[in-house]
Amino acid sequence: MRTRIIVFTLALLLILSQVAGCAEPATTGEELSGTLPIFHAGSLTIPFAQISEDFNKLHPEVEILAEGAGSATTIRKVTELDKECGVIASADYLLIPELMFTEYADWYIIFASNQMCLAYTDQSQFADEIDGDNWYEILQREGITYGRSDPDQDPCGYRTLMVWQLAEDHYNQSGLYDNLYEAEGDLMRPKSVELIALLESGDLDYAFEYSSVAKQHNLKYIELPAEINLSDVDFEDFYAQAEVEIAGKEPGEKVVMIGKPIVYGVTIPKNSPCPEMAIAWVDFLLSEQGMDIIEANYQTPIIPAKTNDASKLPSELKKYITESD
């Protein structure tokens, strides 16, 4: 009878560990098995799905549960909702130290870049007229709708506001930001990828997106000048004049985000219940095969990758780092 109770208890503990969301990995040699939750920026949905598919060819017993959201929302799932997570990837690497250090993480690796654009379709009003010189004028026309994501949840949201601020200076259009912000045609959604369906249905004329997302979804887009699209390190000083206030760690706390070139970051939370699987997945992400997938999805890989502190990295990942950020 006692033996049966022990066996039942062990079985129950095993079931509970699986339900927890990030099962402890079982290893046999190089084999990994279990569940690996990955929380990532919405703009990484397509490349990360492809990376996970190829990762599973090497580790078929790993079940990857990916959740895409605005990067700040993604991080707060761990820091505020206490969700278990193996890997976190943010569209703005600065959110990792801002919202996770030092309780939940103490390192990050930056691995890719992107740029802002204005996406639209053939159904969009004035689609045959809009270009990189007149887009801001067309957005102010009566009846035009344009979308952006929530800056408190999604870096694409506060980067959109930065683009508007920089455009006011670049095009010498005093008052442009105020004319666009919360105007009648200004529509906000929690994350930028939610605007895609509205564009495709014709319920939205234009949306501020990352160029990679526009290309992945075969949308038309205006390629914004380098001076305002947050892609070029040569304009870093100019970008820095843009500032947007977003929600901080604590209720009521605010954090000021400064304009910088768009750079993505990845980390493994300190309380990850599956660090072996998480390290193996990030290792694959940073490998030549993983970076090829990132590049094939219209983002620019950062090779070699950079980190805030190489001494804190898992040893398996140090081979990708040659300099500190």
Image (cartoon, rainbow, N blue to C red):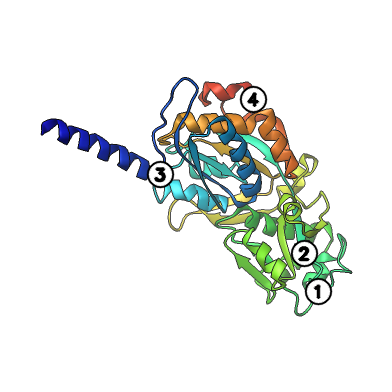
- Circle 3 SS class: loop
Look at mark 1 in the image and give the residue it sits on. Answer: 125
Measured as percent of width and height from the top left, residue 292 is found at: 72, 35
For the residue carrying disc 3, how many other residues have a C-alpha within 10 Å: few (<14), some (14-19), or many (20+)? some
Give the mark nearer the N terminus: 3 vs 1: 3
Residue picked out by circle 3:
21
Relative placement, left or right, of 39 versus 305 is left
| Badge nearest the viewer, 4 or 3 | 3
Disc number for residue 169? none
* 10 Å crowding of disc 2: few (<14), some (14-19), many (20+): many
The image quarter containing residue 48 is top right
Residue drawn where x is 45% and y is 31% of the image: 275
Distance, label 2 to label 4, CA atoms, is 37 Å
Mark 4 element type: helix
Amino acid carrying label 3: it is Gly
Relative to 72, does residue 146 appear above or below in the rendering?
below
Closer to the N terminus: mark 4 or mark 3?
3
Q: Is residue 308 visible?
A: no
Left or right, residue 41 beside residue 228: left
* Residue that carries the numbered disc 4 in the rendered image: 320
> Which one is in front, 42 or 7?
7
The quarter of the picture where the N terminus appears is top left
Q: Residue at x 39, y 47 (%)?
A: 82
Q: Amino acid at mark 1?
A: Gln
Q: Amino acid at mark 4?
A: Tyr
Quarter holding the C terminus is top right
